[in-house]
């Protein structure tokens, strides 16, 4: 299994707007070969931001890479810049190979 996570720093007071964006978006992941699961995680709040992470599980690195080159990926990220003012910088992608 292969895990991808994007970490987002969201300005304090903008957490509900960020969650609403994710609840309202079409991820275009249904039916994508190798896609297993998705969750949006809320982490701790700090002085100026709250940490969020998107968590996606894939059958393999190959399946994730294929998705990033697909039409479904382009559609899912078409409105990625919406409400840019709630973000403290771009998301940070982290990838993990499940070993146990």
Image: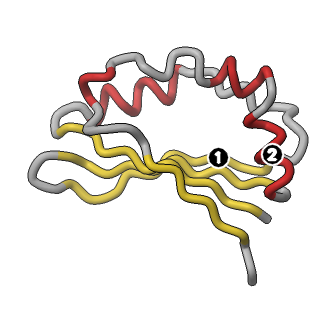
- Asked if residue 46 is positioned above or below residue 77 in the image, the reply reads below
Residue 78 falls left or right of residue 64:
left
Name the residue located 50 percent from the left edge and 48 percent from the top edge. Answer: 6
Quarter of image, res 2: bottom right
Name the residue located 78 percent from the left edge and 45 percent from the top edge. Answer: 65
- How packed is label 1: few (under 14 Cα within 10 Å), some, or many (20 or more)? some
39 or 6: which is nearer to us? 6
Numbered disc 1: secondary structure: strand
Q: CA distance from mark 2 to mark 1?
A: 9 Å
Name the residue located 25 percent from the left edge and 23 percent from the top edge. Answer: 85
Image quarter where the N terminus lies is: bottom right
Q: Name the residue beneath numbered marker 1.
A: 38
Q: Name the residue beneath numbered marker 2.
A: 35
Name the residue located 66 percent from the left edge and 28 percent from the top edge. Answer: 27
- The location of residue 52, given as percent across then percent down, is 38, 48
Residue 80 falls left or right of residue 32:
left
- How packed is label 2: few (under 14 Cα within 10 Å), some, or many (20 or more)? some
């Amino acid at each position: 299994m292969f895990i991808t996570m994007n970490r987002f720093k969201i300005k304090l007071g903008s957490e509900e707007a960020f969650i609403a964006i994710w609840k309202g978006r079409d991820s275009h992941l249904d039916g994508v070969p190798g896609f297993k699961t998705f969750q949006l995680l809320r982490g701790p709040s700090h002085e100026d931001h709250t940490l969020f992470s998107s968590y996606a599980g894939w059958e393999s690195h190959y399946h994730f890479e294929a998705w990033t080159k697909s039409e479904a990926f382009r559609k899912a990220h078409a409105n990625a810049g919406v409400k840019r003012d709630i973000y403290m910088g771009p998301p940070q992608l982290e990838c993990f190979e499940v070993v146990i």
